[in-house]
Amino acid sequence: MNANHMQGMSNSGIGHRQHGLSMLELLIGITIGLMVSVAAVGSLVYSRVSATTVGDSSRLYQDAAVAFRAIGYQIRQGGARRLVSTGGNVEFNPSYVGFGSGSSTVVVTGVNGTSTITETLRISFDTTPGFVVTDCLGQTSTLANNVSSTFSVSAGALTCGGSGSTTGQWQLIQGVEDFQVWYGRRDPANDSFRYFTADAVPLWEEVESVMVCLRLAGELSNYPTAASTGCSGEAVPGDGRIRRVFRRVFNIRNLGI
């Protein structure tokens, strides 16, 4: 065997020789893999928490919209009365007085809430024979000349009771921590406008608008939330649940007819 042939065999063996990973290269690869895995898991957890937070918060906004839609419809109808024919003349139904008596017509009234008494809002408007005029439960009234709806909170749920044949309360939304109502009245002496709690309203006949506040809490309790303020500016300590405070003002459009 000549020298050239030996040299070729030697070069062929060197060209096919394989090298394994060193310990340092292996450790670096494992470390990079772990870092990628931790980042992926963290991103997944963050995405799930974010999605849950958005879902919980969205539910509160949807619940507030449902509550204000039901309350607002009744208040905007408040004080509406039908036309009747009397002695050849057409006039607004004189038999409708709402929650008043005699010649005093009261469209809206309420009870101021305390630690032992539930805040209550009541709205009234006239019935209309031959037309479907309903209370907050969607029922026709069993009362003569009066459709009324009552809103209050029971066991963390905003409820509605009507003047139809169904008795009891119907739950509108849940997760209600506070329900506050203020009543707007214009002082005829100086034309100033103020809002009063139910126990301080000077004359219910002169209430022109209603301000409603709802404090709602989310279902989950795993958020790092801070203390917040409620409907009356009171401090509400954080307990891991999302909270939102919603306010809405409704004008009584049929006042004085």
Image: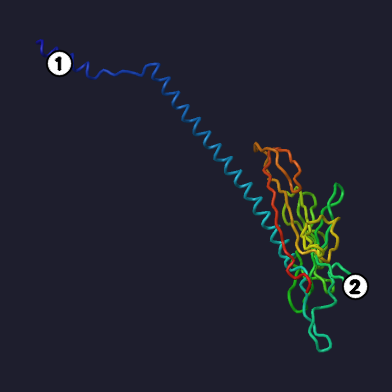
**Residue at the extreme bottom:** 88
- Residue 3, how many percent across, how many down? 10, 10
Q: Are marks 2 and 1 in contact (CB under 8 Å)?
A: no
Which of the 4 image quadrants contains residue 165?
bottom right
Going 85% across and 46% down the picture, which residue do you hit? 115
Image quarter where the C terminus lies is bottom right
Three-letter amino acid code at disc 1?
Gly
Q: Nearer the viewer, residue 240 or 99?
A: 99
Q: Quadrant of residue 212?
A: bottom right
Apparent side of residue 240 relative to residue 32 in the rendered image (left or right): right
Q: Is residue 209 above or below residue 140?
A: above
Residue 15 percent location from the top left of the image? 22, 19
From the image, tell me which residue sits under label 2. 102
| Quadrant in which the N terminus appears | top left
Which residue is denoted by mark 1 in the rendering?
A: 8
Q: CA distance from mark 2 to mark 1?
A: 124 Å
